[in-house]
Image (spheres, rainbow, N blue to C red):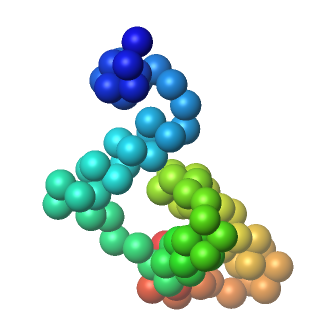
Amino acid sequence: MSSVDDFNTGAGNEMNANAYEQQQNASGQQQSEDYGDKGLDALEKKEGVNLGRSTNEKITDTAREGFEKVTGKDVPSKWSN
């Protein structure tokens, strides 16, 4: 089975999901990113890894929730939504 077949059928690994996300973003469905997302993207680029948009959202959401739980203060939406 070729990699195109893997992509079309949803078979394969995380790389296929990342390729799909990049294709969706390139097609004009760009999702808005807050500063937390942009910072994590920059760190990934520097380190040469790509965890994928959904994984990044989970990481930044968990960090935001942890900060809010510890401090009792809300994080502004431009930093993390």
In the displayed structure, 38 sits above or below 29; it is below
Furthest residue toward right: 70
Q: Is residue 56 visible?
A: yes
User: Which residue sits at x=82%, y=79%?
Assistant: 70
Measured from the top left, where is residue 19 in percent x and y? 39, 44
Q: State the residue in front, 4 or 39.
A: 4
Measured from the top left, where is residue 4 in percent x and y? 32, 26
Furthest residue toward left: 28
Q: Is residue 61 visible?
A: no
In the displayed structure, 69 sits above or below 14; it is below
In the displayed structure, 67 sits above or below 47; it is below
In the displayed structure, 43 sits above or below 16; it is below
Measured from the top left, where is residue 73 in percent x and y? 68, 87
Q: How many marks?
A: 0
Q: Specify whether 76 is left or right of 1.
A: right
Furthest residue toward front: 2
User: Which residue sits at x=54%, y=78%?
Assistant: 42
For the N terminus, the image quarter is top left
User: Which residue sits at x=35%, y=42%?
Assistant: 20
Q: State the residue in front, 41 or 37.
A: 41
Q: Specify whether 61 is left or right of 24.
A: right
Residue 16, quarter of picture:
top left
User: Which residue sits at x=34%, y=71%?
Assistant: 32
